[in-house]
Amino acid sequence: MRQPLVIANWKMHGKGAFNEALVTDFLTALKEHRAECVLCPPFAYLGQLSELLGASDVMLGAQDCSHIDQGAYTGEVSAEMLKDIGCQWVIVGHSERRQYHQESDGLVAAKLGMAQRAGLVPVLCVGETQEQREAGQAESVVKAQLLGALSDLPDLNGLAIAYEPVWAIGTGLTASPAQAQDMHAFIRDVVRDLDAGNADTLRLLYGGSVKAANAAELFAQSDIDGALVGGASLDAKAFAAIVGAA
Ligand code: 13P
């Protein structure tokens, strides 16, 4: 039995007073929940959120980490530093990093290794573009991303994978529950070939315009174990409803 997991990716949003209100309102709105829950604010607000989350069971994550452990790399933040300030999770290989920062599968693989060595749980993001889906390449693209990132990782235990079709991110378009389930089942099969022992316990999250209104039907699919939520995670009540639905 896989415990549901819902992760908020705030992307580059937030400001001191806004964050305080958002987290406070979210914790108030959050009722009994089965799901594990993680908030990933920008680096600048990790310390603030660590304090705001206090003794709650909501965990802290970062949106990225460096592929290097330390040194003269201006602007980089290492996985060990994230662990040091109280992060337990880190998102790796988000499509916006791949698109705007030219992150390759090799770089993503190096980041995954760093995250695991530091004791963080990495959430690997994969997903195809609209053009790739229309060309019938969705599965081959996702498979290449999975193999590129995971093949050299010694252990897939504890990892989570988020399927985020690029065409569904921030667009209001959501993969249908059946489309998402098909890809999740495919991802689990690819993982099974790499690491049969961990394929059935590994959690697969869907991301792309997840909202309170569509969360339950996505979570009802057998291989969808939760969500990676962008826009709706900036609304306390909506995000609490998504966590409650998982
Ligand atoms: P939206 O929920 O805003 O579509 O973003 C999804 C996402 O990219 C989460 O990482």
Image (cartoon, grey):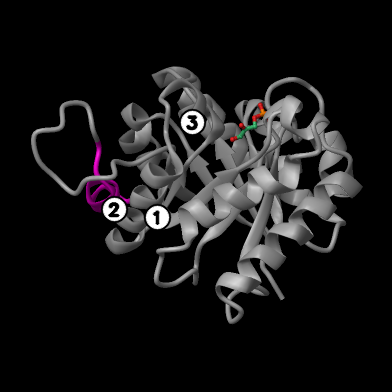
| Residue drawn where x is 29% and y is 53% of the image | 83
What amino acid type should be assigned to the residue bearing mark 2? Lys
Mark 3 CB lies closer than 8 A to ligand 1: no
Residue in the foreground of this view, choosing between 139 and 94 = 139
85 inside magenta stretch: yes
Q: Which label was assigned to residue 15? A: none
Q: Which label was assigned to residue 88? A: 1
Residue in the foreground of this view, choosing between 153 and 87 = 153
Is 137 displayed left or right of 96 in the figure?
Answer: right
Q: State which quarter of the image contains the N terminus.
A: bottom right
Q: Which x, y percent locates residue 86?
A: 31, 51
Q: Residues within 10 Å of mark 2 (few under 14, many from 20)?
A: some
Residue 74 seen in the current view? yes
Mark 1 CB lies closer than 8 A to ligand 1: no
Q: Secondary structure at mark 2?
A: helix
Give the labeled residue for mark 3.
Answer: 98
178 inside magenta stretch: no
